[in-house]
Image (spheres, rainbow, N blue to C red):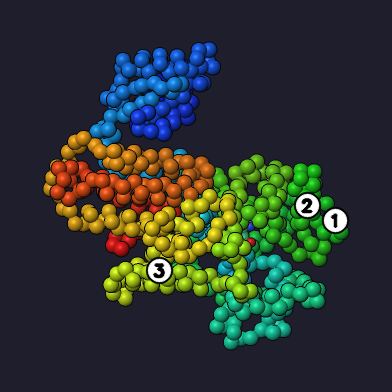
Amino acid sequence: MKEFIVKLIAKETNLKPKEIENLIELPPSDKLGDYAIPCFILSEKLKKSPLIIAEDLAKKLRKNLPKEISNVDFKGPYVNFFMDKKILAEDVLTKVKKKDFGKNNLGKKKVICIDMSSPNIAKPFGIGHLRSTIIGNSIGEICKANGYKVIKINYLGDWGTQFGKIILGFKKWGNEKKLMKNPVAHLYELYVKANDKKFDAASRDEFKKLENGDTENLKLWKRFRELSLKKFEEIYNLLEVKFDVISSESIHNKKLDSIISELKKKKLTKKDDGAMIVDLKNEGLGIALIQKSDGTSLYATRDLAAVKNRKEKYKFDRMIYEVGQEQKLHFRQVFRILEKMGHAWSKDCVHVAHGLYLDSDGKKFATRKGKTIFMEEILNEVIEKAKKNLSEREDLSKKELVKRAKKIALAAIYYGDLKNSRENNMIFDVDKFLSFEGDTGPYLLYSYARASSIIRKVKSKKTVKIVDLKNTEIKLLKKVNSFEEVITNAYKQLAPNLIANYSFELSQIFNEFYHDCPVLGSIEEGFRLKLVDAFRTTLKKSLDLLGIDVLEEM
Ligand code: ARG
C-alpha cells in the first residue's frame, strides 16, 4: 500500500523513492489517516515553512488520487493519507493466500553462516548455550525468510586446556559406572576436582600430550566426546532444533600451523614471555594470545582457522556468531586480526551477543543451591508444569496431554526468551512463561487454536462480501498487512524480538476483533472467516520464524 504513496509523492516532489519510503510514518490515531509524511526535509529544500508545504502538497495530491487512496489531508507539518479500506481488505486477503507471503528476495543467492549453540564437551549444556540455540535458530529462520541460504553450524568446544584437567581427573578418580550413567555430570565433577592450582602443571602435561597425539589421551578424549555428544543430542531432540553442520574446535586444530605462519609472514605476531601474541593494545583491544609458551594452541587461534575454513567452504556473505556478550572482546580481536591479515571479508563477520538469564532474585542463573543445573532437568521440569496446568484445564488422553504439554512448554521457553531484546539480561521465570494470560508463548498458541477452532466449526457457504468495515477489522487487516515489513526489519537488526512482539500484538488485535465482531451467523460471515484465516496464516508464519510449533486444539 505504501508504494502508492511513494509514487504519488515522487510525482510532485524531487525526492527519491527510497527517501520517501523512509519518511513514511504510522500516525498515532486513525483520525490522522493510515500513513503520514512529515514535511521538514522538503521545507529545508524549498525554503518554505513545513506547514505551508503540507497544505500545498495535500491540495495538489487530492486532485489526482489513485483508487487505493481515498483521501489526503494535512495537519500541521504533516500530510496524512487515508487508504481505501475495501481495497486494503481485498489486497490483504489475496496476499496471505500466496505461497511466498512472508518471504522476500533480499538475500537472493547469498549465504549466511550462523555459529550457534556450541556447547562444550564434558561440561553441562549451559543456560547461555540454550539462549544461543534459541536465538540463533530464530535468526536463521529470519534470514531464510529474507531469501538467504542459511547454514546453521554447531561449533562444539571439544579442544583446549580444560581437556588436560578432565583427562587428569579421569585418570585419578574416574569411575566407569558413573561415567556410563551420566557422562556429562561425572566428567564435570572430575573437571571441578582437577581444577586446582596444585594440579595445573600435570593438567598442562596431559593436554600437551593430547595435542601431540598421545594414543591413550586421544582415546579417552574421543570417548568423552562421543558420550557428551549423545547427551547433547537428547537436548536438541527435546528442543526440536536441527543443525546443518556439526563442527568443532578440534577439527580446526589441525590447521593452526598455516594460520600461525600466515600471521608471522604478515608480521603480525610478537613474542611475549615465550608465548606468541598479536598486540592490539594500540587499538584498545588488548593482547590476543595465539600460542602458549609450551606450544599449545588457543581458542582465538582455532576461531581464526575455523572462519577461514568456512569462508573457503561455504563462501559466506555473512558470518553470524550467536554467543554470549562476555565474549565481546574475543570476537572483536578475531575480526580485527582477520582484517590485519588482509581479509577484507572480516567486515562480514558479526558477533550477535545475548545477555544473561537471571533467576527471580536477579542473580545469574547458573547454579541451584550451589548445585550445577542440567538443561534436560530444566526442560523436563517445564514440561511437567505445563502438563499440570493443562490437566487442570482439560480432560485429555495421556498421549494428547504429553504432546500438547511439550509444545506448550517449548513455546513458553522460546517465546519467554525471544520477546526480549537479546542484549538485555532476562529473568528466567518458568511460571510466568507458562501463563495462559499476558505476553506469553501459551497465549499465542491459544490464540492460534482459537482461530483454528472457528474455522473448523463454521463451514460458511456465504459469499465474501466486504460491507462497512469495523474498526477492529481494519486494525487486524493493517496488522496482517505490516507482517512483511517486520520481517525485513527483524533481519536488518538481527532482532527476533521484533517478530515475537509482532506475534503478540497481532494476537491481541485478533482477540479484540473476535470479541467485537461475531463471525457465525453474521451478514459478514464469509468475509470474517477469511479474516480469521488470514490471521491464522500470519501468526503461524510468524511463530515459525521463532521456532515455535502451533497446536490446532488447546
Ligand atoms: N564453546 C564456546 C563456549 O561455550 C562457545 C563457542 C562460540 N563460537 C565460536 N566460534 N567461538 O563458550
- Residue at 29 percent across and 25 percent down: it is 70
Percent position of residue 286, x then y:
77, 50
What is the C-alpha distance between the residues marked 1 and 2? 10 Å
Screen quadrant of the C terminus: bottom left
In screen coordinates, is 116 left or right of 475? right
Please name the residue that numbered disc 2 is placed on: 287
Say whether disc 1 or disc 2 marks the residue closer to the N-terminus: 1
Q: Which mark is residue 272?
A: 1
Labels 1, 2: front one = 2
Please name the residue that numbered disc 3 is placed on: 386
Percent position of residue 369, x then y:
61, 74
Say whether disc 3 or disc 1 marks the residue closer to the N-terminus: 1
Labels 3, 2: front one = 3
The crowding category of the residue bearing disc 3, from other C-alpha atoms within 10 Å (few below 14, some 14 to 19, many at least 20), is many
Q: Secondary structure at mark 3?
A: helix
| Quadrant of the rendered image holding ligand 1 | bottom right
- Tell me the kind of residue under disc 1: Asp
